Amino acid sequence: MKTGKTMRTAVAAGVAALVAAGGIAAVGLGTAAASTAQAAALNRTQLLTIQQVAAADPGGEWIKQVDRGILPKTYCGPASTEGKRVSERMARGFTDDMAKYGAQYVSRYPDVATAKAAYASIKATLKSCPAGKPAPTHTRRLTDNRVVTGASGDGTVVIRWYDYPLPSDPGSEDGAFPYAVTLKGRTVSVLAFSSMGQGMSRTNVDKVARLAAAKIIR
């Protein structure tokens, strides 16, 4: 079996690369003329907690919540976490403190039409995912692109990429990158997970997605 360094190379650094998490705290980006209701709409009680993620995915061994410092770089890049004209944003990370990462990115927009456009652009980015180019000895395929039923809001989809070695590199690790995206009024939530192997099961991704959709506001 190859080392963790090989794994990071194989999945194009999607699991392990880290970026500055300026969006971890809620940040108002509106003008001075924005209403008080818009400016104060998001708060961190609307984010999933590590306990909720661990309960929904008990086999994942999620143990650490990240609210300060750095978050994992998402497999499909920054455009997969929010759209344009963001009024507010906040985020929270989750990890098993080894090679499994997740994060929730919540963004709020000036109006419903802008939020719908953001939702559409995020889904389009995820389906093409140019940032997640595999290493030369790997390839990838889209294994999920479906609607989650029973979720609160105006729509929730799950899109999952699976990155795996070619026959020429049999000792390299595979990796799974499921996303769950929810539109709810003027708010969009994006869950992004990264792990070696097959990753979180479909059933558990749906559980986490429904929990996230229930907590965000319109």
Image (spheres, rainbow, N blue to C red):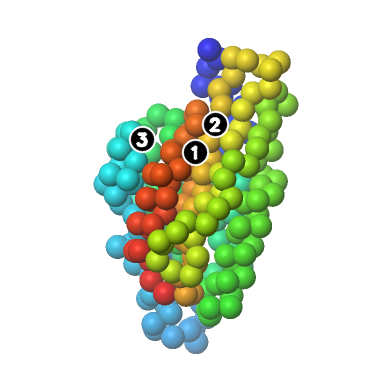
Point out which mark residue 194 bears.
1
Residue occupied by mark 2: 175
Amino acid type of the residue tagged 2 in the rendering: Gly
Label 3 CA crowd tier, 10 Å (few <14, some 14–19, many 20+):
some
Answer above or below: position of 57 versus 9.
below
Amino acid type of the residue tagged 1 in the rendering: Ser
Label 1 CA crowd tier, 10 Å (few <14, some 14–19, many 20+):
many
Residue that protrudes farthest toward the top in the picture: 1
Q: The residue tagged with tag 3: helix, strand or loop?
A: helix
Inter-mark Cα distance, 2 to 3 = 14 Å
Residue 41 coordinates in the image, percent (x, y): 38, 75
Looking at the image, which is closer to me, 126 or 82? 126
Residue visible at 65% across and 37% down in the picture: 141
Inter-mark Cα distance, 2 to 1 = 7 Å
Of the numbered discs 2 and 1, the one sitting upstream in the chain is 2
Point out which mark residue 60 bears.
3
Residue 212 coordinates in the image, percent (x, y): 38, 58
Looking at the image, which is closer to me, 16 or 192? 192
Of the numbered discs 2 and 3, the one sitting upstream in the chain is 3
Q: Left or right: where does residue 91 sit relative to residue 46?
A: right
Q: The residue tagged with tag 2: helix, strand or loop?
A: strand
Of the numbered discs 1 and 3, the one sitting upstream in the chain is 3
Q: The residue tagged with tag 1: helix, strand or loop?
A: strand
Looking at the image, which is closer to me, 31 or 125? 125
Q: Are marks 2 and 1 in contact (CB under 8 Å)?
A: yes
Is residue 148 among the parts visible in the rendering?
Answer: yes
